[in-house]
Amino acid sequence: MDETTSETVPYERSFPAIMFQGTGSDVGKSLLVAGFARAYSRKGLKVRPFKPQNMSNNAAVTEDGGEIGRAQALQARACGVRPNTDMNPVLLKPQSDYGSQVIVQGKIWGNTGGGAYWKTRKNLMPRVLESFERLGQEADLVLVEGAGSPAEANLRSGDIANMGFAEAADVPVVLVGDIDRGGVIASLIGTREVLSESERERVAGYLINKFRGDVALFESGLDIITDRTAFPSLGVIPFFKRARLLPDEDAVSVQDRKTQKLNEGAKIRIAVPLISRISNFDDFDPLIAEPEVELRFIHPGEVIPAETDMVILPGSKATLADLAFFRAQGWDVDLMAHIRRGGHVFGICGGYQMMGELLSDPIGIEGEPSTVTGLGLLPVETELTATKTLIEVCGTDRISGIGLHGYEMHVGETRLLREGESRASALLQLGDRAEGVYIEEGRIAGCYLHGLFSDDSFRAVFLSRIRSEEVVSVNFEALIDQVLDELADHLEEHCDLDGMLEAATRGVKT
């Protein structure tokens, strides 16, 4: 790992900025920042999103050839700008329960165990402030998202994600509490109690998110919070149902979907096994949005339903470990039964690698060097390499001739075995190179391309291929922008946007 000094010149902020920190994880910070970004942008401000440190395997490729958290890519879209690596200068991508790949300003910085990273993360503050400054110089307002919670006082030393960053960058803070999970009064008052005096003074107010019912019934609750914390209320935000159509930030949200409403009108049933290190799971959002599709995440210990039309093997941050996990659930047996019934299988990135005959990790990218047998569904083999591919691409589906676009984000190279002897063909044509493999007229296929289901024309053809009939497809990209506008309307109605903007200007050095 590169060494980065922790010695910094005192930072002076020269542009408006405000930070949103949660009383806990998954309180809705990411979507709130996206909604506020769209709302302030519609007022004519040049807005930029920023998250000093993120932990997620749901990542996006930037136009400068790096990667950031998918949530910051959505927030950039809400601002009407292309994402860049300064929007999320530190990204942790968990590879195991104890270790993560560390991405700094879009590039791999190293791999580290949790304990080692928490001891050295303060050394990354200069890089974080460097990215923050670059963003601010092109913006009228920077909306900063915290990670986890400032209430995790045991992690305060060396913090670059919450109050540690807010104090270093001299940024005011809005605390966000989630009333839907219960205990919001205690969570806000308790968070205040573990903050230092200087941190308390930095808090400009609080928001109550995901409220259900009559807001008037919570007036006494607001009085209690304000009286005990001295923080002003900046809004009570009613539950926004359409938020489910926007990408989740991390796998916790997907893994928490223990029950799912069955779509009685579905023509196509898709199953996605929830492997332990699932990555880029927003690949499935366009399929979830389809009224004729029922997509179910299959949790560990569950069986892949016999009525499934297609099984999609998702991307993974630890392909070899997740292949072992897949087999431990008995899903390899379920998958073979599914294929014998005539079912379809599609693999994306790590899922594509698992579908091959052999996977090798000769230099120990994912741990000890090893070679394992794949699922044997496609005549390919994969070798993990030190080079990481990060690129946006456009191309053609070679089966239908339909154009498509997406992005590649993977470690490893996959090659076709017994070329000329098997019935396998290249699935995609990306410029002058072939990508992916299919057999049996596309019933079993895989490729490295993430994001291809966001392309409406390709998605319609892909779904029609499953049922051999035309499927009416939604305009997914237009739907996302529509929901962002609806979210902005929702926040404008229920939050004090003027008060937050005024707070953002405090402390600006001219």
Image (cartoon, rainbow, N blue to C red):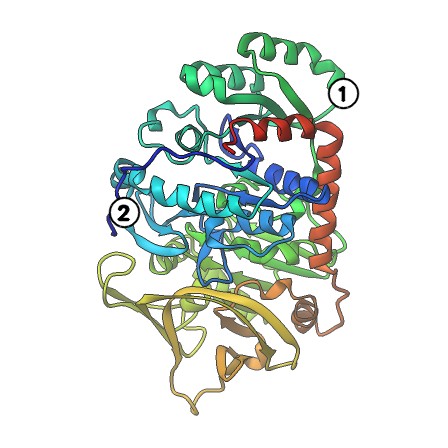
Residue 112: give its label: 2
| Residue drawn at 72 percent across, 41 percent down | 43
Q: Amino acid at mark 1?
A: Asp
**Element type where label 2 sits in the image:** strand
**Residue type pointed to by label 2:** Thr
Q: Position of residue 491 (x, y in %)?
A: 70, 34
Which residue position is annotated with label 1? 214
Question: In the shown orientation, is residue 310 left or right of residue 133?
Answer: right
Q: CA distance from mark 2 to mark 1?
A: 47 Å
Kind of element beneath mark 1: loop
Question: In x, y percent, where is residue 174?
Answer: 56, 26
Does residue 304 show up? Answer: no
- Asked if disc 2 and disc 1 are in contact, CB closer than 8 Å, the reply is no
In the figure, 33 relative to 415: above or below?
Answer: above
Choose the circle earlier in sequence order: 2 or 1: 2
For image coordinates 46% across by 36% down, the residue present is: 147
Q: Quadrant of residue 488?
A: top right
